[in-house]
């Protein structure tokens, strides 16, 4: 029932402009570790971009920088043409781990953003209930965080972000701890949301099926160069069938790209170990 | 009771010990000088170990005496009475006097107090609730027709430490204070004070006790010979000080500097000394009257029975030997 | 499988568990009673052995009589009232200033770094040392006492606020800022609750600093009322019963306050955060 | 793309950052100097305005002279030495007992619950109140002073240990127990490091309790040496210079100790845990 | 290169015996929530059992109970016939989240278990280095935990458990945050380990490919009955091809099982929401 076409016409609502970021290695010689090296992405209004890349290649770092939570060493983030250096409610991150507030119940966590926005108790409670239902947790609305399973926590984090209703959603492996069915359900709900509200979404995942199923475009990041290695535009209509021949081709290509980097990294590691 | 924690103080063995307490005050001058320069140790002989304990407040000294941590101490009249009464007459005996006089009623120059008539609506301080000066002040006010605030009157009396009295008088928070020397002298010098009344004027012959020597009853009973030696040294030191006033001031400050980090300014010391006498006479009558006054004012629930507080037999024996007048 | 039955069984089991939790409070009370009984017993024994004379170590009965006397002549009730009022006043001021300065220290890093050293330096100041200054600045009155109380506890509040907030796991602050929290909202809705476990520990101690200072100040800055004054009179006339009676009063007040304030907050936080899952 | 060049650029940038971190310490020192200068300036001004006579509020110069005198007549150096020795002794005992009891409280829940109330009650006890008992038990000597110091700080250590360990995220303890940690190994390798951020906060305060009590005890239990004794003499003869000189000494010692002990540990922990990533 | 056959002969090294566990709902009427209801599993020595089931069905709870970290309301855990009520070094859990020690470096975390066992510094450091290499983190050996990405943390947790070399490994979604290649690599390494050391492994995952690829047996848990719904023995030799017809059949079956529960749960949720 959900359909979509690649929006060629839309303007770049989010511009990642030559962003670089490095960390120090915690080793005696404190080498510099360049994580992002002049990364540039243009994301059009209402575009759904999925990001894949090996573990540790800088995906979370990039999302954090886009959200204004970390500052890049160089480069800039532009939203609707304006340069952004701090956080704002229009770019919400669903964090990879542990960002729920243990002093609040599930419901209170979900309504937190609305509370900050000054929404009245009644309204925000209603909205929160809606999103808690969406992620299938109505029975746990009054539970505290420690009482939830890993997958349930992830779903609360999703509900919390959706409740804020931001223009740009930055999702960092949001479905990693979910079972197939719940994941399918949430795929549909995210796509529905994307379709109806025209939200711009950046979505990090390790699941290539997920990447090609959801994205208008799949971005492959490489730890080797610290930048974007390749992009795949996917103009197939939704709902997509991951088993279809077109999809299989794209998946194969993406896997190849990832494979290359992986072997490179392995070689590097090995030589280092020998040294 | 069983003696506990006392290290051989009551035992009858060879090496005996005498633990003496005193305050670094001028009315304990005999102790300050005699203990400081070793004269007391000499007088007691080498087989008696003298241990010195300095105090800065009477209650601690009594506490220490109760706890069997000192055997003998120089002390003011009030703590002595309190200790005697608290222990139902068991714990201690006054065995000699040490000083007489040396308390003054100071008023602030700009407080508008020129005669007894001007004391209404004033604020005064004394060093401690219920101590000699406090009792004297309250009694004096009472006798002159004033009631203190806590009794529904219009004069306020409250306790403050001597050091704080100076500050309060400088800040004009109080109009006067009844204090021991050398604080009187200090108030005159630093706090724009004036002597309104020298307490000696209120007593026959100007004699009233401001320092005693007390002994733990138990120790006194078991070691009369040691106490005798101490009293003899005390009497001698008293005489020496009285005969060599100037030298004594020097000696006093020299010792004070050793133990107390800072000396007392010489002018304050001399001014203070001029209003008191060092003596071995405990001026019994003044103590008893003071206690009676305290009862009148309401500090005691019942008139304290101080009949057994004195044990002057040893002192009198020494006075007799020295052909000095004995205490009645 | 008749799992309906099993469910019922399990539910019963849980009901039992709950009631055993309730009965735990009874065992808590029993424990306290036991401790106290043992303590009073030993005390009575020491008294009976006459290790120390009665005027140094009075019997429990003597102290109870003394407490009765102090209540009868009203000095204890008034003393408790006045002292608690002073404590509340001083501690409220400390909390206000301390939390404010602590937050400013978090916000302005340079200031925080410098001030944290000063605060620790000033925290080690014995409260007694403030008394002369207090008298110079304020005279012999409640303000002077309050000043001493504030100076003794405010630095503890400052350090507590500063450290507790700085030790919050950064992810909470990130998430909150991401959702648009800043300024007072960040403080009120994130920093305070996230720092609560550590704040309670620190504030409890600040509270004790305030107590210590207050009693000390009441002993030295005489205003003729307050527990400290009663204690000082007891000491002045070497009346051990009064001293012990006052100490017992302070002890009991301390426990009551802890139970009705700090303990309550603590238990609530612990159950929410799942910290009471420790050793199950 | 010549990303070799970019790398070099980035590396340089990092080098700058590092040096700016180093220069921060200089700014810290500058801040402290500024604070102190401002303080001394105001003090001098107050002195010059003659709001209070010089014997109530001496000038900075007078106090410095006094410090010189006290150093010259050796009372300050000896006082510092003796006081620090007592502090170290008393605090070591407190740490030993406090940590032990705190652990026992964690281990035995019932005991913990009861004891935690008692500990808080006893923590609110003013240390002054322990003095008479100390004299009864130990006499007028260092043991008595130590006793007061221990009684004033041990309950703070107990509460700190107990709360800090109980607030450790349960997952760490689970993981450790899973890997076979228990008894002393669990305590040494997991509980202590996991609780460190909170322990530092609490121990700092316990340390201050010990200071307060020590100075108070040295004032009341006269042994003719120690900073407290100097302070008490200053108070007895109302010599403000002595009082201020002593306070400055205590303040400086407090800061030095904090910087060489607590601050060091704290910064290390913070950097390991990534807590200094807060507001970048 | 790795082959394996289903070990029919081996005895039950681990016996989960009618284990039940319930929690209270955090709702006003504090309903009881039965998570595990008389769950029984026999695991043979050297068996590789994978566990799948919807989010929140009690998989982590079961592993914790087996490890002795939580106590069941009823039932018991037997290891080699002996009843176990507490933890021991022979049953190590790889936790789903956040169990690394932030005060230790990566290397120190990995050698922690060996340190407890009293292994000398040299030896344990060597072992730790080996396992850090295995999970491709040699360059981060001296990093602290906050300096790692999500996937890197998971790998450290794996290395830490492997270093202890337990008889029974309880792995709770260990590869959820890893990219395809790293995951493949670790699959091979785990299988190799299993093959060479005959470790008994319980492995929770939401990835059905992973479940059928690794397991000698796949256990499907159901939140509806709070117990094991179905088991699938997979006797295909390794390495397996997830695309092969046999595998596809098994996967289909497993998915069906899961689907059923999911729909049941959805219905339940919906009625509740309406009430
Ligand atoms: N605060 C930090 N200090 C030092 N290094 C860091 C820090 N944060 C991230 N890094 C490093 O940056 C790199 C990228 O981390 P990031 O979390 O962005 O990876 P990722 O692509 O999200 O990986 P994953 O898929 O595993 O989540 C990692 O190598 C990590 O070690
Ligand atoms: N301490 C607790 N208090 C209350 N309920 C709890 C507690 N721990 C777990 N639960 C509940 O038990 C159920 C099972 O949790 P568990 O973590 O075992 O699920 P899981 O199968 O591992 O799920 P996931 O795949 O999401 O990790 C959940 O519904 C959870 O809410
Ligand atoms: Mg990541
Ligand atoms: Mg789980």
Image: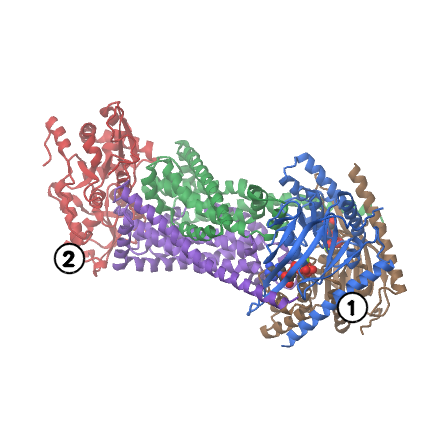
Chain colours: A brown, B red, C purple, D green, E blue
Total marks shown come to 2
Q: Nearer the viewer, residue C12 or B212?
A: C12
In the image, which disc is placed on residue A84? none
Q: Nearer the viewer, residue D137 or E49?
A: E49
Residue C233 showing in the rendered view: no
Query: Would residue C75 be found to the left or right of residue A133 on screen?
Result: left
Looking at the image, is A124 positioned above or below residue B35?
A: below
- Residue furthest to the top in view is B46
Looking at the image, is D195 positioned above or below residue D81?
A: below
The verdict on label 1 being within 8 Å of ligand 1 is no
Query: Would residue E32 be found to the left or right of residue A256 on screen?
Result: left
Residue count near mark 1 (Cα–Cα under 10 Å), binned few <14, some 14–19, many ≥20:
many
Same chain, marks 1 and 2? no
Pointer 1 indicates a residue of which chain? A
Residue to which mark 2 is pinned = B145
- Marks 1 and 2, how far apart at CA: 96 Å
Q: Nearer the viewer, residue D268 or D16?
A: D268
Residue to which mark 1 is pinned = A45
Residue D163 showing in the rendered view: yes
Q: Nearer the viewer, residue C227 or C159?
A: C227
Res C260 quadrant in image: bottom left
Res A251 quadrant in image: bottom right
Q: Where residue E139 appears, x then y in whole percent?
A: 74, 43
Q: Secondary structure at mark 2?
A: loop
Judge depth for marks 1 and 2 and give the one in front. Answer: 1
């Amino acid at each position: 029932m959900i359909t979509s076409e690649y929006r060629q016409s839309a303007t770049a609502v989010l511009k990642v402009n030559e962003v670089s970021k490095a960390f120090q290695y915690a080793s005696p010689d404190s080498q510099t570790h360049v994580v992002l090296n002049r990364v540039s992405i243009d994301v059009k209004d209402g575009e759904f971009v999925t990001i894949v890349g090996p573990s540790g290649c800088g995906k979370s770092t990039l999302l954090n920088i886009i959200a204004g939570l970390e500052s890049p060493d160089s480069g800039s983030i532009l939203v609707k043409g304006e340069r952004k250096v701090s956080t704002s409610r229009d770019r919400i991150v669903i964090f990879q781990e542990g960002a729920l507030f243990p002093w609040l119940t599930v419901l209170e966590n979900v309504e937190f953003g609305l509370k900050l926005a000054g929404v009245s108790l009644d309204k925000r409670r209603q909205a929160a209930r809606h999103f808690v239902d969406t992620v299938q947790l109505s029975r746990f609305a009054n539970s505290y965080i420690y009482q939830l399973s890993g997958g349930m926590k992830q779903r609360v984090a999703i509900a919390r972000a959706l409740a804020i209703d931001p223009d740009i959603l930055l999702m960092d492996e949001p479905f990693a701890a979910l079972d197939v069915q719940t994941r399918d359900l949430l795929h549909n709900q995210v796509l529905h949301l994307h379709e109806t509200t025209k939200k711009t979404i950046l979505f990090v995942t390790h699941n290539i099926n997920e990447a090609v199923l959801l994205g208008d475009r799949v971005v492959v990041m490489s730890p080797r160069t610290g930048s974007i290695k390749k992009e795949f535009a996917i103009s197939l209509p939704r709902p997509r069938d991951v088993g279809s021949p077109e999809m299989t081709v794209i998946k194969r290509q993406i896997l190849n790209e990832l494979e290359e980097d992986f072997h490179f990294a392995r070689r590097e590691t090995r030589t280092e170990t020998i040294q | 009771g069983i003696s506990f924690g006392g290290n051989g103080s009551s035992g009858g063995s060879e090496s005996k010990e005498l633990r003496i307490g005193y305050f670094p005050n001028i009315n304990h001058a005999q102790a300050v000088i005699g203990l400081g320069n070793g004269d007391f140790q000499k007088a007691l002989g080498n087989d008696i170990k003298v241990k010195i304990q300095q105090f800065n407040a009477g209650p601690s000294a009594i506490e220490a005496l109760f706890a069997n941590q000192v055997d003998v101490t120089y002390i003011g009249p009030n703590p002595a009475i309190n200790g005697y009464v608290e222990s139902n007459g068991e714990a201690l005996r006054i065995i000699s006097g040490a000083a007489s006089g040396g308390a003054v009623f100071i008023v602030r120059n700009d407080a508008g107090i020129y005669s007894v008539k001007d004391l209404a609506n004033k604020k005064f301080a004394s060093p401690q609730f219920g101590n000699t000066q406090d009792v004297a002040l309250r009694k004096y006010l009472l006798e002159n027709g004033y009631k203190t605030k806590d009794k529904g009157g219009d004069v306020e009396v409250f306790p403050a430490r001597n050091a704080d009295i100076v500050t309060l008088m400088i800040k004009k928070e109080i109009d006067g204070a009844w204090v021991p020397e050398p604080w009187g002298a200090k108030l005159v010098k630093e706090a724009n004070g004036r002597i309104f009344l020298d307490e000696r004027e209120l007593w026959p012959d100007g004699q009233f006790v401001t320092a005693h020597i007390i002994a733990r009853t138990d120790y006194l009973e078991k070691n009369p010979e040691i106490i005798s030696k101490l009293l003899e040294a005390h009497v001698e030191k008293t005489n020496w000080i009285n005969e060599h006033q100037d030298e004594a001031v020097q000696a006093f400050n020299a010792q004070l500097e050793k133990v107390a980090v800072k000396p007392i300014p010489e002018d304050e010391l001399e001014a203070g000394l001029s209003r008191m006498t060092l003596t071995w006479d405990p001026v019994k009558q003044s103590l008893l009257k003071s206690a009676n006054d305290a009862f009148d004012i309401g500090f005691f629930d019942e008139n304290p029975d101080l009949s057994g507080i004195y044990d002057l037999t040893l002192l009198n024996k020494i006075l007799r030997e020295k052909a000095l007048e004995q205490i009645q | 499988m008749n799992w309906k039955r099993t469910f019922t069984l399990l539910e019963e089991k849980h009901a039992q568990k709950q009631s055993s939790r309730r009965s735990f409070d009874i065992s808590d009370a029993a424990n306290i009673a036991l401790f106290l009984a043992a303590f009073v017993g030993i005390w009575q024994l020491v008294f009976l052995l006459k290790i120390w004379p009665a005027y140094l170590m009075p019997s429990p009965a003597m102290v109870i009589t003394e407490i009765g006397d102090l209540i009868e002549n009203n000095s204890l009730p008034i003393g408790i009232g006045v002292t608690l009022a002073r404590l509340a006043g001083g501690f409220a001021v400390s909390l206000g200033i301390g939390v404010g300065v602590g937050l400013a220290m978090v916000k302005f890093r340079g200031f925080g770094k410098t001030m944290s050293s000063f605060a620790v330096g000033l925290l080690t100041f014995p409260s007694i040392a403030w008394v002369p200054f207090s008298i110079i600045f304020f005279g012999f009155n409640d303000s002077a006492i309050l000043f001493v109380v504030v100076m003794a506890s405010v630095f503890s509040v400052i350090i507590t606020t500063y450290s507790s907030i700085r030790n919050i796991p950064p992810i909470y602050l990130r998430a909150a800022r991401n959702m648009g929290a800043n300024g007072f909202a960040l403080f009120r809705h994130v920093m305070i609750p996230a720092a609560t476990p550590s704040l309670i520990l620190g504030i409890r101690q600040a509270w004790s600093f305030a107590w210590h200072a207050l009693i000390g100040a009441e002993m030295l800055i005489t205003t003729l009322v307050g527990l400290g004054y009663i204690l000082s009179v007891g000491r002045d006339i070497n009346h051990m019963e009064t001293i012990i009676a006052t100490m017992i009063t302070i002890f009991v007040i301390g426990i009551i306050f802890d139970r009705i304030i700090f303990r309550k907050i603590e238990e609530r936080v612990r159950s929410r955060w799942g910290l009471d899952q420790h050793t199950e």
